[in-house]
Image (cartoon, rainbow, N blue to C red):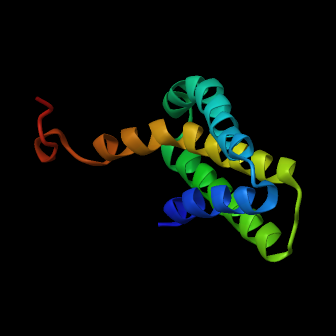
Amino acid sequence: MGGALTSLAVPLQIWDLTRSSLAVGGLGVAELVPLLTVGLVGGHLADAVDRRRLLLTTRMARVATSAALAAQAFGGSHLLWLLYGLVALQSAAGALGGPASQAIVPSLLTGDQLVPWP
């Protein structure tokens, strides 16, 4: 739910600040670059470290960036680079935690509890 609200609120805030479609489109770059670069490390990291700890850490990082986004919005900040940076950090945390999130369920269940993949 929080991610959906962020996906709506941040572009709206950038539009209100700049009235520029290009600035709103810059959010795609701010999300995509960390997703591609950090995402390459996420799968390896999920196999190398404790998945629960990695998942907890990345979820807390996403909560912290959401809180920072809310704080700057309620504080009346007009810093566009801050919005892009926080969105990039949130995207990087999601890219690191995504593989751990997907891999944690099979490690918690026994083989007969898992639904076979077609």
Q: How many marks?
A: 0
Q: Position of residue 70 (x, y in %)?
A: 72, 70
Q: Residue at x 76, y 46 (%)?
A: 84
Q: Residue at x 88, y 62 (%)?
A: 78
Is residue 67 toward the left or the right of residue 45 in the image?
Answer: right
Which of the pair 13/88 is nearer the observer?
A: 13
Which of the pair 36/117 is nearer the observer?
A: 36
Q: Position of residue 7 (x, y in %)?
A: 56, 56
Which of the pair 59/77 is nearer the observer?
A: 77
Is residue 42 toward the left or the right of residue 65 in the image?
Answer: left
Is residue 35 toward the left or the right of residue 1 in the image?
Answer: right
Q: Residue at x 61, y 49 (%)?
A: 58
Name the residue at the bottom extreme: 74
User: Where does the C terminus fall, quadrant-wise?
Assistant: top left
Q: Position of residue 8 (x, y in %)?
A: 56, 61
Q: Residue at x 16, y 43 (%)?
A: 114
Is residue 14 toward the left or the right of residue 50 in the image?
Answer: right
